Each structure stands twice: as structure tokens, then as C-alpha cells.
Amino acid sequence: MLPYTTVEAAEAALGRSLSAAETLWLNYSANKSDYFLYCHNILFLFLIFSLFPFYYLFLEYFFQKSVGPYKIQPKVKLSFSDTLRCYKSVMRMFFLVVGPLQLVSFPSIKVSVFWSFNGSAPFFECFVKLGYWVLDFRINAVSFVME
């Protein structure tokens, strides 16, 4: 939850008046739980997954000659129904995989910034080393079999 529940408290802490957007957001989110606000990320992801493909489709259908040289497969031209089928497939995966994963991945334990960095850096280093060892083992095992 936000540390300020009123506009006056937030303005006093900041030392300035809030903008219209800040006031609107504070009035909306002041009494909401962190998890409820975290669930808003699904809406933002949905917008990103929807708006970027439509922008690409707009370029693809109306500016074919300009976009053609930059395509990975410039000779492939998909019909509108194929494109719509692909979009529906991606959205189905979004709601079946990305949405639930986003809801489940909410951090349930609050950790200070200092401890989260100092705690995550060694784990990241171990993860990188483990990945290196696994890759090294796979390469050596394959080269041993091939000799």
C-alpha cells in the first residue's frame, strides 16, 4: 500500500502540489492492497501484446515495399485470416500461461533493497557458474563421444 492515504499527506511529504494524474492515481490506489495493484500488470501486458502486433500489421499491409527488406522472410505473405489465427493463438497462450504466471509470481515476502541485492547477487553468481559447468560438461561429453 502507498504510505500516504490522503492528497494532503502526499503533498506535504513531496513539498509540492500533486498533478492531476498523480491525484487521480492516489485517490484510486490509496486504499488498495499491493497484490491488487500488482494484478494491474496483466492489463499492461495485454496492451503490449495487443498494440505492438497491430502496429506491425499496419506497417505490413499498408507499407509492404518499405517493410519488405527488413523482414526475416521477405517472400512470405500471410493472409489476414492467418494473421488473425496467430493473434488468437498468442492471446490464448497469454491468458493460459502469462496471466497465471504473473499472478503467482507476486513477491509475498517484503525484503529491503539492501538485502535483496546482497542476497540475489550470490545466487545469480552461483546460477551463472552452474550454467557454465553444465555447458562445459555437455561439450566435453559430446567431444568425448565423437572421438
Image: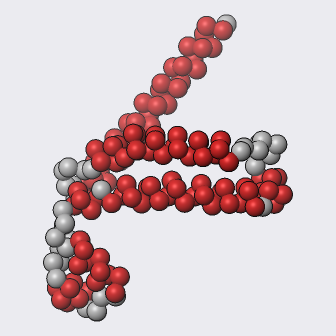
> Residue at the bottom extreme?
16
Image coordinates of residue 25 in percent, x first then y, are 29, 76
- Note whether 30 is above or below 76 in the view shown: below
Percent x, y of residue 92: 46, 41
Choose between 134 and 5: the one closer to the eye: 5
Quadrant in which the C terminus appears: top right
Is 87 on the left-hand or right-hand side of 70?
left
Place of residue 85 in the rendered image (x, y in percent of width and height, measured from the top left): 59, 41
- Taking the spot 53% from the left edge, 24% from the top edge, the residue there is 136
Image height check: is 142 above or below 117?
above
> What residue is at 48 percent from the left and 46 percent from the top?
91
The image quadrant that residue 30 belongs to is: bottom left
Q: Nearer the viewer, residue 133 or 8?
A: 8
Q: Residue at x 63, y 14 (%)?
A: 143
Q: Is residue 37 above or below residue 84?
A: below
Residue 26 position (above or below residue 88): below
Residue 105 shows in this picture: no
Residue 26 visible to an observer of this rendering: yes
Total tally of numbered discs in the picture: 0
Across and down, in percent, residue 62 comes to 75, 61
The image's colour scheme reads: secondary structure
> Which quadrant holds residue 38?
bottom left
User: Which corner quadrant holds the N terminus?
Assistant: bottom left
